[in-house]
Amino acid sequence: MRCEAVHTLAVGLLWPLAAISTVGAVAGSLAPATAVPPVAPDYLMHFTGYAGIALVWLLAVVWCPGLGDPSSVHGRRIRAGRVLAAVIGMGAGLELAQHFVGRTAGVRDLVANTLGVISGWILWSRVIMICDAPHAARARAIGVSDSSETERRS
């Protein structure tokens, strides 16, 4: 299946997944400690949860069509940076908010959240690289330099 087809199909799933993952993180973080049964080691849950949240938000906000055609790699990087900062900020805010609902906030949890966000970004960058490869190959075939094609397509 071509990346464009996958891209179009994913659009209808990305925004709901982004919303559900965010609501899940908020609910799980602010629920009383007794209401959240441990299903895996705490840091593993933080790491994988925030990797997933970062990945789905990056796909929805930066890769998803309908937000205007980015004119450069620079524009994509700026939007990605904003998404990453927002997800890390959400994790920090939720850790601080736990103090007000009778739970304990932890620096280790915040580190696990941040490492998860970075892992989600790395995975997202690989997806983008794979889907941009056919465009770069087509550009080389018609004699457009990689840098100008990357700037134009990103």
Image (cartoon, rainbow, N blue to C red):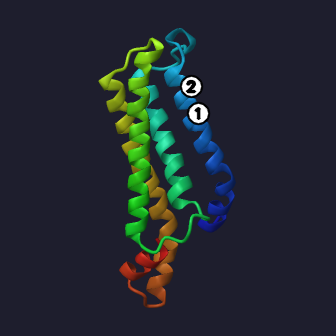
Q: Quadrant of residue 11?
A: bottom right
Q: Quadrant of residue 16?
A: top right
Instruction: Determine which residue is flagged by label 1.
Output: 23
The quadrant of the rendering that contains the N terminus is bottom right
Mark 1, Cα crowd under 10 Å, few <14 / some 14-19 / many 20+, is few
Say which amino acid is labelled 2: Ala
Secondary structure found at label 1: helix
Residue drawn at (57%, 12%) of the image: 35
Tell me: 95 left or right of 20.
left
Tell me: 145 left or right of 3.
left
Residue 58: x and y, percent?
49, 52
Residue 95: x and y, percent?
40, 25
Q: Residue furthest top?
A: 34
Mark 2, Cα crowd under 10 Å, few <14 / some 14-19 / many 20+, is few
Pick the front one: 79 or 39: 79
Q: Quadrant of residue 74?
A: bottom left
Tell me: 1 left or right of 106.
right
In the figure, 150 relative to 62: above or below? below
Instruction: Determine which residue is flagged by label 2.
Output: 27
Residue drawn at (50%, 40%) of the image: 52
Q: Are marks 2 and 1 in contact (CB under 8 Å)?
A: yes
Residue drawn at (50%, 59%) of the image: 62
